[in-house]
Image: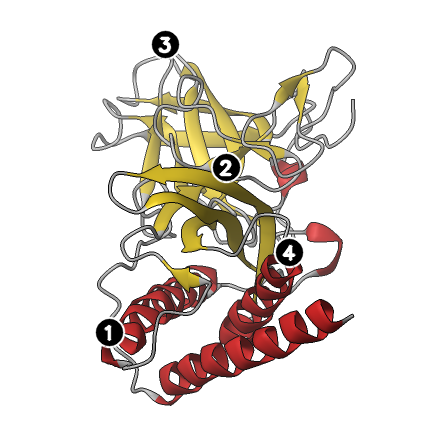
């Protein structure tokens, strides 16, 4: 009991010290986010982008989920700047049905197809038939262009951190108390950013040092992820999401937290505590993941290699994996079950 009370009291003192670091960080003015990484997606696609068709091969088009799509022209690149006499345009959607205008689809008099707030189930094969003449005397020509239109979203990524601490003996309850205190502090640090910290693993090892002999070290691995604002793990429905900005700020706060631990130790005249952060051991990696029903495939989608593209028929993604898995029983786009 005495050892447990001593460990609890020591953990309490350590928690106060760590909380002091958090208070200093939260009170500090916002710094420039030099480490900010923008959402990785293909080149910007908006309503001003124009895409032409081909009679030789299907043209792949990527429309960001819940965003307005580019202007998809019912014309080839060769005919784009020519005068067409009596042109007739007709669009057919997935399943071969003739497209008509509605709240999410608009077709201009010149045959341009546009989507509003594109949804996963609108993905599929679209064809456009163009009947035209180049001169009034010539017979009418008929061209059919095929488009493969896919919904895509940015990666639902997270950060994975590793850090090492000098530790108490590996069977000490002090280490367990410290682990809980550290997670509480890190969680508090990013709570206002709607981010969460999750411990992936914590391992204590004996490390032989060249001059210090045998030392105990704790290897912490934890993730920092943005909390989804939508329920049921669905992609954000807003026109713009601040996930990247919030995660970037969370990363900055965590990196500063570990830097300030080193600064406090350097300025302190007290002996080193039994557990302390080992300078320079904090490492971070960017981990991609896609929402259910979406996956990355640079070979299949070379024009959108870092996008999470809706799973095509014959594949599915049941969770936050990176890739769509094969499934012979899947006949829809965006399948989450096989």
Q: Earlier in the sequence, mark 4 or mark 2?
A: 4
The alpha-carbon separation of the residues under discs 3 and 1 comes to: 68 Å
Instruction: Residue under label 1, please give it.
Output: 266
The alpha-carbon separation of the residues under discs 4 and 1 comes to: 63 Å
The alpha-carbon separation of the residues under discs 3 and 4 comes to: 32 Å
Q: Given the current orientation, which residue lies at the most extreme bottom position? A: 27
The alpha-carbon separation of the residues under discs 3 and 2 comes to: 27 Å
Residue at x 44%, y 86% (from the top left corner): 23
Is residue 185 positioned above or below 278 on the image? below
Residue 132 placed where, x, y %?
38, 23
Instruction: Residue under label 4, please give it.
Output: 103
> Which quadrant of the structure image shows residue 245?
bottom left
Quarter of the picture containing the C terminus is top right
Helix, strand or loop at label 1? It is helix
Helix, strand or loop at label 2? It is strand
Residue at x 46%, y 64% (from the top left corner): 274
Query: Closer to the camera: disc 4 or disc 2?
Result: 2
- The reply to whether callout 4 and callout 1 are in contact (CB within 8 Å) is no
Question: Which class describes the residues within 10 Å of circle 3: few (<14), some (14-19), or many (20+)?
Answer: few
Residue at x 43%, y 66% (from the top left corner): 250
Residue 201 placed where, x, y %?
59, 44
Q: Is residue 207 visible?
A: yes
Answer with left or right where residue 265 lies relative to residue 103.
Answer: left
Residue at x 48%, y 61% (from the top left corner): 243
Q: Is residue 227 visible?
A: no
């Amino acid at each position: 009991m005495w050892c447990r009370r001593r460990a609890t009291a020591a953990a309490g003192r350590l928690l106060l010290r760590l909380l002091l670091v958090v208070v200093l960080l939260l009170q500090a003015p916002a710094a420039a986010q030099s480490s900010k990484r923008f959402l990785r997606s293909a080149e910007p696609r908006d309503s001003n982008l124009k895409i032409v068709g081909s009679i030789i091969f299907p043209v792949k088009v990527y429309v960001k989920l819940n965003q307005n799509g580019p202007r998809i022209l019912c014309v080839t690149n060769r005919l784009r700047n020519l005068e067409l006499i009596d042109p007739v345009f007709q669009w057919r959607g997935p399943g071969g049905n003739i497209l008509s205008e509605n709240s999410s689809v608009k077709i201009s008099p010149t045959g341009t197809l546009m989507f509003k707030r594109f949804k996963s189930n609108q993905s599929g094969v679209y064809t456009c038939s163009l009947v035209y003449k180049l001169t009034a005397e010539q017979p009418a020509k008929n061209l059919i262009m095929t488009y493969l239109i896919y919904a895509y979203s940015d990666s639902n990524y997270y950060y994975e951190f590793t850090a090492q601490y000098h530790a108490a003996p590996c069977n000490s309850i002090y280490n367990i108390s410290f682990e809980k205190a550290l997670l509480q502090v890190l969680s508090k640090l990013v709570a206002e950013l709607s981010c969460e910290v999750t411990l992936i693993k914590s391992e204590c090892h004996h490390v032989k040092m060249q001059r210090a002999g045998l030392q105990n070290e704790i290897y912490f691995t934890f993730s920092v992820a943005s909390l989804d604002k939508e329920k049921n793990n669905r992609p954000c429905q807003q026109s713009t999401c601040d996930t990247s900005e919030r995660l970037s700020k969370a990363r900055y706060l965590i990196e500063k937290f570990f830097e300030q631990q080193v600064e406090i130790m350097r300025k302190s005249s007290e002996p080193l505590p039994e557990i302390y952060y080992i300078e320079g051991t904090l490492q971070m990696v960017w981990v991609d993941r896609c929402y259910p029903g979406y996956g990355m495939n640079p070979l299949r989608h070379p024009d959108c290699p870092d996008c999470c593209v809706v799973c095509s028929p014959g594949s599915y993604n049941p969770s936050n994996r990176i890739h769509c898995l094969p499934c012979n029983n899947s006949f829809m786009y965006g399948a989450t079950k096989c």
